[in-house]
Image: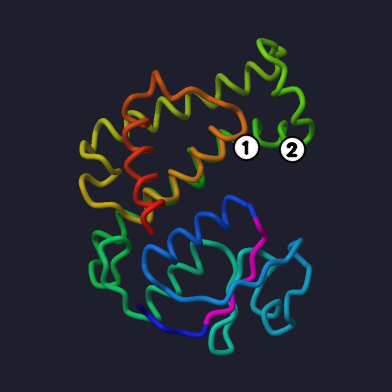
Amino acid sequence: TITMSVDLYYIPDSYDTQLLLSVLEYLKIEYKPIAVEYEEDKLPEELSRYMVTPKLPAIMHEGFGVGGVKPIIRYLVQDKDIKDQFYPNDDLKKRSSIDAYIEHDQMVYRFNFIPLLKAYEKDSKIFKRDGFRSDEIQELYDKANTSLDVFTEILYRNEGDFILGDQVTLADFCYFYTTKEVIDKFKIDLGKYEEIQRFYSSVENLVKES
C-alpha cells in the first residue's frame, strides 16, 4: 500500500467520484475522504487558489491542490513514481496511447452523450415513460447509439478484453464510467453491442475486486 497524506474532496454519488475512487483503490493509494455538497462548498482557500474554477473531485497533498479526475491521477502517479501498466510513469509510449484514448473518451465518446445527459438533468421524468420518446429525445438517443457504434469499432479493432488489448489501463476505467452513467440513467440495452458488453463486464469485475 502506498501511504501518503491525501485529502480528497468529492461530491457523493457523482460518476467522476466513482471513477476516481475506483482508480485510487486499484492503485492502492490511501486518502482521507471529505464529502461536500457543492463545487464551492467547504473548499479550503489554499485549494481554491490552485484552481481556475472550483472543480470536484479535488485533493490537497503536502500543501498542493489540484482538481479534476485526470489531473489528480496524473499528479499522484508522477509523485509516487507508480510504474503499474495501468498508467505507467516509466513508459512514455504506453502512457501516450492511454492519454489519447482518455482524450477520445472525454472529447468524443462522452461529448456525444452530453445532450442526452442535459435533457435528463432538466426533466428525468420524460425518460421514465415506457415506450414514449418525442422526436427530439429520439434524436438524442440516435446520437448516443452512434457513439456506442464508434466505441464498438475501437474495441473490435484492438481485440482483447480491454481497449489496449489484455492489459487494463486508466482509459478502460474512463470509458467504463462514461458507459455506466448512460446505462444507469437511460437503460440502454448493450445486448446488440457485444464488444462493449464484454468490455463492460471485464472492467466491472475489476472494479468490484478493488
Image height of 140 relative to 37, above or below: above
Q: Where is residue 131 in the image (x, y as percent from the top left)?
A: 66, 10
Left or right position of 174 against 49: left
Question: What secondary structure is the stretch in magenta mostly built from?
Answer: strand
Are there few (<14), some (14-19), or many (20+) residues within 10 Å of tag 1?
A: some
Which residue is the extreme one toward the front?
209
Q: Which residue type does callout 1 highlight?
A: Ile
Q: Where is residue 99 in the image (x, y as percent from the top left)?
A: 37, 56
Image quadrant in which the N terminus is located: bottom left
Residue 183 numbered mark, or none: none
Image height of 60 relative to 38, above or below: below
> How many numbered circles are shown?
2
Image height of 80 relative to 106, above or below: below
Residue 194, picture quadrant: top left
Q: Which residue is at a point 64% across and 70% down the rendered structure image?
A: 9
Q: Which residue is at a point 71% across and 33% down the rendered structure image?
A: 120
Q: Name the residue under label 2.
A: 121
Q: Earlier in the sequence, mark 2 or mark 1?
A: 1
Residue 43, picture quadrant: bottom right
Image quadrant in which the C terminus is located: bottom left
Q: Position of residue 148 (x, y in %)?
A: 44, 28
Q: Which residue type does callout 2 highlight?
A: Glu
Residue 95 is inside the magenta segment: no
Residue 95, picture quadrant: bottom left
> Which portion, as a residue range, is magenta?
6-12
Q: Mark 1 points at which residue?
A: 114
Which residue is the extreme one toward the bottom?
62
Callout 1 secondary element? helix
Q: How far apart are marks 2 and 1 (CA)?
A: 10 Å
